[in-house]
Structures are given as structure tokens and as C-alpha cells.
Amino acid sequence: MTTKMDVRVPPRDPCPQINVTIAGAGSPGKDGAQGPQGPTGETGPQGEPGEAATISNVTASVDDTSGDPEVVVAMGGTAQERSFAFAFSGLKGENGKTPVKGVDYWTPEDQQSIVDQVLQDLPNGDEVEY
């Protein structure tokens, strides 16, 4: 490595001028060890608001299975234009008992008929003395 240094002081210039010339640089040396973490810099300015995302498509399917209810959600599309597919399973109930009218339930008409019959069968109180 050759270093040439010229120092010139112009006759009427109170400050010296230094010119440094490095000629024919040699091979670079090995990289040194990583230095310590520097201090955290100041927070930068607030960025511009991003583009609002949209949901382009939503689908749902329900299969014919019973058991523990479950939904699988598949997300597609891009961060700016999403699609969602919901696949539900296990929503069908087990086969149950078919209710029997007059045993398991009464219709409003049945209920009114029973009330009318009870009122008709009650004594009117004329036969009782107090």
C-alpha cells in the first residue's frame, strides 16, 4: 500500500490545505468481530394509511353427520382481497323419539277442550248450604 501526502500552504491563505492520495491499495483484511448493539433510534414519522382489505367471497357448507359440532375455516385470496370457506360438520342430531299427542304434548285446542270439560263438571254450588 502506498500513501502519498501533500501538504500545501498557499502564500496568502491562513489555513493549510492537505491533499491525501492513496495509491495501490492492498488486499482487504479480515472482518472484525460484531460490535455491540447500538442504541435504539427515534421513532420515525407515521406512515400513510394502507389500502383497506376486502372480503371477496364467503361460502359455507354443512354435511349430514352427527356427533361433535365442528367447523373448518379455509382462508384464501390475498391480504387485500380475502375469501373464506366454512365447512360445518356434526350438526345433525341423533335420531330421537317422535312425540305422541296427548302424552308428550297438547295442542292449544286440546288444552281449551280440557278446561271447558273441567268447568262443565264442576258443581255450581247450588247444592251446598253454608
Image (cartoon, rainbow, N blue to C red):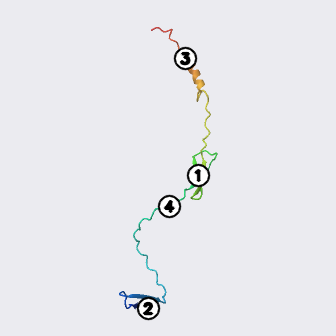
> Callout 4: 10 Å neighbours few (<14), some, many (20+)?
few
Q: Amino acid at mark 2?
A: Lys
How much space separates mark 3 and mark 1, taking CA atoms? 58 Å
- Report the residue marked by disc 3: 119
- Mark 2 near mark 1, Cβ–Cβ under 8 Å? no
Label 1 or label 4, whichever comes before in sequence order: 4
How much space separates mark 2 and mark 4, taking CA atoms? 51 Å
Q: Amino acid at mark 1?
A: Val
Residue depicted at x 43% and y 88%: 20
Q: Position of residue 126 (x, y in %)?
A: 51, 9
Q: Is residue 78 positioned above or below 71 on the image? A: below
* Front-lying residue, 13 or 87: 13
Label 2 or label 4, whichever comes before in sequence order: 2
> Callout 3: 10 Å neighbours few (<14), some, many (20+)?
few
Label 3 or label 1, whichever comes before in sequence order: 1
- Mark 3 near mark 1, Cβ–Cβ under 8 Å? no
Q: Nearer the viewer, mark 1 or mark 4?
A: 4
Q: Quadrant of residue 43?
A: bottom left
Q: Amino acid at mark 4?
A: Glu
Residue depicted at x 45% and y 89%: 21
Label 3 or label 2, whichever comes before in sequence order: 2
- Report the residue marked by disc 1: 72
Numbered circle sitting on residue 48 = 4
Q: Secondary structure at mark 2?
A: strand
Q: Secondary structure at mark 1?
A: strand
